[in-house]
Amino acid sequence: MNSAWTLPDNGSHAHSDDAGRAGRSRTVEIKETVGNAGMERRTLILSGLVSSGLISGLAVAGQNTAAKAPVVIAEAFRKDDTFKKAVSVVVTDEALSSVLPSIGKQLGIELRTSRDTGDDKISLAVKNRPAGEILSLISNSLDFIWLKEGAAYRLDQSLVARKREAALARGEQDRRLAEIADRMKRIGALAGLPQDQLASRRDEAMRLAQDPNTSAAQPAQAVDESEAIRDLLRPGARPALAIWGRLSGQQRDSLAAGGSIRFSSEDGSLPRGVSDQIAAAGQSQRGMSSVAVSQEIRIGPGGGPPPALGVGPDDQDNGPKSYSAEVKLVQGGARGVIRIGGLGSPAPEPRPRLEFTLLTISGGMGRRRTMPIMWSPTISSSAADESWPDTQTRDPRLLAEIDLKLPPTPAGGQQLFDPFAPGRIPGARSVGTLAALIHAETGLQLLADSFIRARMNPAPLAGKQQVVKLLDQIARQMRYSWRMEGDTIVFRNPKYFRDRPAEVPDRVLKPLKQNITRSGAPRLNDLADTAAALTDGQTLGLQSNWGAYMEGVGPATMGPTGIHDLRHHLRFWASLNTMQRQTALGGSIVGVGQMTAPQRERWLVALTAPSEGRIFEPSSNRPTPNPQQLAGGGFSMRQGQGQMFSMSGPPGGIGGPGSGAPGAPGAPGEVRQNVGVFILGDVSVGGRPGGGPGLPPGGGALAQPRILGPNGQQLDLAGARRVTLDNFSFNYHLAGQEQPVRSVSLSLPQPEPRKP
């Protein structure tokens, strides 16, 4: 088994992210040979930079310092008097490919970026400072280097820095995987206890967690115990534990590499005992009054009356049943019932999540109905993750009290989760924006890197406060570090190695936002072109932070499907030319013989790609074709229309009185919000357009659906948010067959009517 899933020998979850924890100073010698003609071999000596934090990849969250460290001037600038010239720069969240040429204009020289550095964004507020000092601050903070190219200078990332970034990412991933393995072992150890003993231990753990007279370690241990018991008691825990115990070391390594493992009763890979556990978990979930429900119906041509959807009586679920399960490692994000911290608490630390999707699939009467159960173990933040000590300083500039001129914030104080615009926090401001406000009030010089996750509601910064307290509050909320370098305050993301590969570059994001602004909603071709231009890490970052990236674009809701979940299908669509798209949309099949070699490659990837986020697709829907079947393969596109309802409510349930209103407070400083999502419409695949749930045969106006909640009660949709959807079904054919072997649906919201 890979050591990534193995706990450290000492059993401790504390992780030393870097050598800088010990405060040691050391010399790092970086020798590089640059292959471009006319460029010499260079040796760069970085002395004492680990302890001062100038090698910023080694910064530690929560370790802020007000001690003034000198700026180490880049070697490339030391013999060029041009860089002694003073410059002034104020930019917020701008790409280096834009910032550096503007500084170069002030100096009369060319400043370039490389492929590795041009998309990185910074915020900078400096006035009348030597250019060499400012440019060196940028390279030191971001772990980049300056190289001379003829009369120009280029900011690049060295091979050593790239290796260091990759090593930090691997170490972080290994630590998180070990936490997951430990958590599953902990829950499994509790599974053999009788229910009354579990309840007793849970009550005792909750008492210790709230007892002010317990030792410092006991509350954390008690919270860990109660969370493990809560995980075990949630529907899906026991089949998930059974599946986890069956995974081989090779399968766990596959999960760590981003793969998914699927089991099905249809092909015998899911044991009968686990199928029975999934069925029992489904029955348990039916009795819960506070559960996120999601349903999608597939029916053949011909339509029929709108069926009742939701968690209803057993007689709604007649017909043959099969069971499937999928386990995968999800990088960040959240689903279902969300707990959101209050404004005074740091945002949750993004971390991998082991996710089990357990499906009960019912067939009959021309439809397929799925009952999904999502289960993941809760991973508590370690003490190292939550350590945010106050910074001690005697610097009068940092001890001065100021009253920031903050923009108005939304009323209510609590921010609710929008399931179709994740990452959106009304009124949130980036670290760079807040740094610019501090600069305007104090004149202090500031530099900050820029990542989409580094945003916060500025309410905790209101009122007269010391500058050092403001800096600490920003760092604590955004999980950043800050330090004084020369006369400049430098903010740095200690987990840059995790966030950097997921950042969406402006050169891709700006055209997408412009097109959405013009059309009023995301369109198929726009998403396809965007997916083709981004890496897998970037599509995941865009999907996870869609609402944040689309700030200021209007509603721009993503809809029930995501650009990352469907990236392979979108990239294939992007590869098709105009005539091929028209053929597919017209109901005809585009054969593989009509595709170019790159198109065939993307078609095959999309045909066989694992389902991600599509919890309704059974295991049997992903084919494993032979060469003869592939030779007769093809693609078609099916269009339809549907509607989506979403609502939120208090812990008592959704769909009742007060649905659509904010949830009632749970623990102090938190809101527990339940989100119910119901997707209806014409999602039939292949053949002529037919009716669907809520649609008459052949299309037409959408009917009001009947949606059943717990105990068969019909949910009141009066307060629900309703969005009309454009449904696109990507249909993949084999062996010349008209009936597709795989169909994957993309649902996009139609543009909302523009206000006059």
Image (cartoon, rainbow, N blue to C red):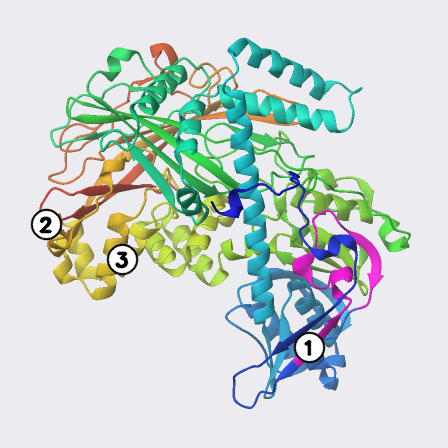
Compare residues 610 and 449 and report the one nearer the observer: 610
- What type is the residue that disc 3 sits on? Arg
Report which residue position mark 3 lands on: 602
Image location (x, y in percent) of residue 662:
54, 24
Relative to 413, is 677 on the left or the right? left
Relative to 544, is 286 on the left or the right? left
Relative to 34, is 596 on the left or the right? left
**Marks 2 and 3, Cα distance to the nearest angstrom?**
18 Å
What is the secondary structure assignment of the residue under circle 1? strand
Question: Is residue 701 in view from this perspective?
Answer: no
Image location (x, y in percent) of residue 530:
38, 56
- What type is the residue that disc 1 sits on? Leu
Report which residue position mark 1 lands on: 44
**What's drawn in magenta, residue-wise?**
43-70
Report which residue position mark 2 lands on: 735
In the displayed structure, would residue 699 be above or below residue 629? above
Image location (x, y in percent) of residue 419:
45, 35
